[in-house]
């Protein structure tokens, strides 16, 4: 059994998705978001994300961490800078935990999961939901994006000879994943335990 953590970096909200299974068969999954307040200094927000990720990696002990690659939009150059800062924190937390961290460009992730590199966030969320057979919308979108990254990591980690685009949700055939019970009685699919207080 392989366990992958997907991370969609963001200063206000960093999406987290955990997927375990083999190849295209998902045995369990969970998701959530690490949120930080705009009222906090930048260093404190980055430290909060780092600390929460360290705890997550310690609790989940994934085989690999898959991170959305940093991109910058011409209209919003500052967002690219903050994404870079958060991505650095994610890579550092993975390194400190002794885990490999790979980056996947967002267009590639959309292409693999939906067959369209220009898919909207809603289209990507629906593709992720369909593959997991999750019984409702996955929110926030950051968490859905992170689950998508974790799914791609699982596909590639377990079956490197299979073309990633060939294992999109449209290919079907994957059994419904089992949602494991977590402390407190919540199912892993519904867990939102990564939020800051």
Image (cartoon, rainbow, N blue to C red):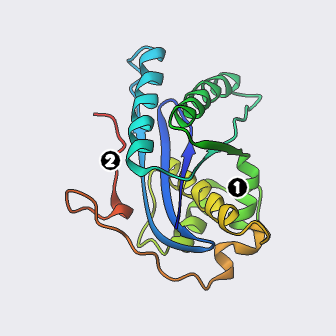
Disc marking residue 177: none
- Name the element at disc 2: loop
Position of 98 relative to 79 (above/below): below
x%, y% of residue 108?
76, 54
Position of 32 relative to 35 (above/below): below
Residue under label 1:
109
Residue furthest to the left in view is: 184
| Count of numbered circles in the view | 2
Residue under label 2:
193
Name which quarter of the figure residue 82 lies in.
Answer: top right
Q: Earlier in the sequence, mark 1 or mark 2?
A: 1
Name which quarter of the figure residue 76 lies in.
Answer: top right
x%, y% of residue 61?
46, 49
What residue appears at the point 34 percent right and 68 percent down from the top-left corner?
A: 180
| Residue nearest the observer in this picture, 183 or 43 | 183
What residue appears at the point 52 percent right and 55 percent down from the top-left corner?
A: 144
What residue appears at the point 45 percent right and 37 percent down from the top-left corner?
A: 53
Q: Residues within 10 Å of mark 1 (few under 14, many from 20)?
A: many
Position of 158 relative to 53 (above/below): below
The C terminus, quarter of image: top left
Distance CA(mark 1)–CA(mark 2): 25 Å
Residue furthest to the front in view is: 98
Q: Residues within 10 Å of mark 2 (few under 14, many from 20)?
A: some
């Amino acid at each position: 059994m392989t366990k992958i953590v997907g991370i969609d970096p963001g200063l206000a909200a960093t999406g987290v998705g955990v997927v375990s299974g083999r190849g295209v068969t998902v045995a369990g999954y969970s998701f959530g978001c690490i949120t930080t307040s705009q009222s906090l200094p930048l260093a404190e927000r980055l430290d909060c994300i780092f600390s929460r990720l360290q705890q997550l990696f310690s609790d989940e002990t994934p085989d690999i961490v898959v991170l959305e690659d940093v991109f910058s939009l011409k209209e919003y150059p500052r967002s690219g800078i903050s994404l870079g800062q958060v991505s650095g924190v994610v890579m550092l937390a993975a390194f400190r935990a002794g885990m490999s961290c790979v980056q996947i460009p967002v267009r590639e992730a959309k292409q693999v999961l939906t067959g369209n590199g220009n898919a909207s966030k809603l289209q990507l969320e629906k593709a992720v939901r369909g593959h997991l057979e999750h019984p409702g919308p996955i929110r926030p979108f950051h968490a859905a994006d992170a689950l998508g990254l974790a799914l791609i990591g699982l596909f590639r980690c377990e079956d490197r000879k299979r073309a990633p685009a060939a294992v999109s949700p449209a290919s079907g055939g994957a059994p419904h994943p089992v949602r494991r019970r977590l402390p407190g009685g919540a199912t892993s699919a519904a867990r939102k335990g990564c939020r800051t207080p």
